[in-house]
Image (cartoon, rainbow, N blue to C red):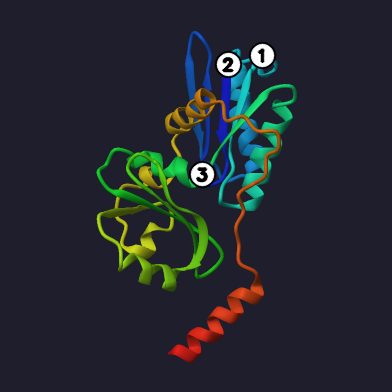
Amino acid sequence: MKILALDTSTSKIVVYYRDSEKIITQTYMGKDKHGRNLGVVMNNLKNLDINFEDIDVVGIGIGPGSLTGLRVGISFALGLSIDKKIVVVPSTKLIAANLMNSGKNIVVTRKARQGYIYGAIYDEYLNTIVEPFVESIENFSKELEKMENFVVIGDGAEYFGGNLPELYNYPEPSRLGYLAEKEVELGNFIEKVEPLYIQKSIAEINFEKKNQRKDG
């Protein structure tokens, strides 16, 4: 079986490929837009004699994250996946996989619009404790004060005292491969792919700010 998986939810594009003979991983962080950067990565794979038409399963990171980045990756993956099987991986779970078996609950935080973060919480075995959500930094800081035995990672970890090396804050292609392969093993194939894009409306944000001023 030939599997190609990719995630474009962060500024770091990650790609995993496996067939019966080899495993190839690619990462790319560039200053250009995701569409151009993803093209660079895919050209690299072509230069390694990867034939996209021969792929059996396409894995896709679905966010949450940058909607533009997600759309680029998902659109590209869907173009590859015609007449092929599809599996999806939440990008927060992908980041959490950097610390699986750590003995602690893993709090993944991603920067959202100003003053807010995307988040999700997993145990050390990547079982979901709290599904992906969006919350203000202030409110989530209060929630973290109630928690024990956890570690915070992701590009939003800086708001909550996270100080692990940066490599833990972004997806890794080998972890993407691990999670995509798990979904294949479980037979979790899907027909329709939607980005996991969770965002509070402007009205909700303004309402929260208004209430916070009252409480203050």
Q: Which residue is at the front of the view, 189 or 63?
A: 189
In the image, 45: left or right of 118? right
Q: What residue sits 55% from the left and 86% below the top?
A: 210
Residue placed under numbered mark 2 in the picture: 2
Q: Are marks 1 and 2 in contact (CB under 8 Å)?
A: yes
Query: For mark 1, what is the residue?
Result: 54
* Mark 3, secondary structure of its residue: helix
**SS for callout 1:** helix
Front residue (pair 129, 120) = 129
Looking at the picture, tell me which residue is in the foreground, 59 or 149: 149
Q: CA distance from mark 1 to mark 3?
A: 26 Å
Residue 87 falls in image quadrant: top right
Would residue 81 be visible to someone looking at this image?
yes
Q: Amino acid at mark 3?
A: Ser
Rendered residue at 61%/74% (across/down): 204
Classify mark 2: helix, strand or loop: loop
Q: Residue type at mark 2: give it.
A: Lys
State which tag comes first along the sequence, 3 or 2.
Answer: 2
- Residue 113, given in percent of the width and then of the height, sits at 56, 65
* N-terminal-most mark, 1 or 3: 1
Pinpoint residue 26: horizontal percent, then vertical percent.
Answer: 50, 28
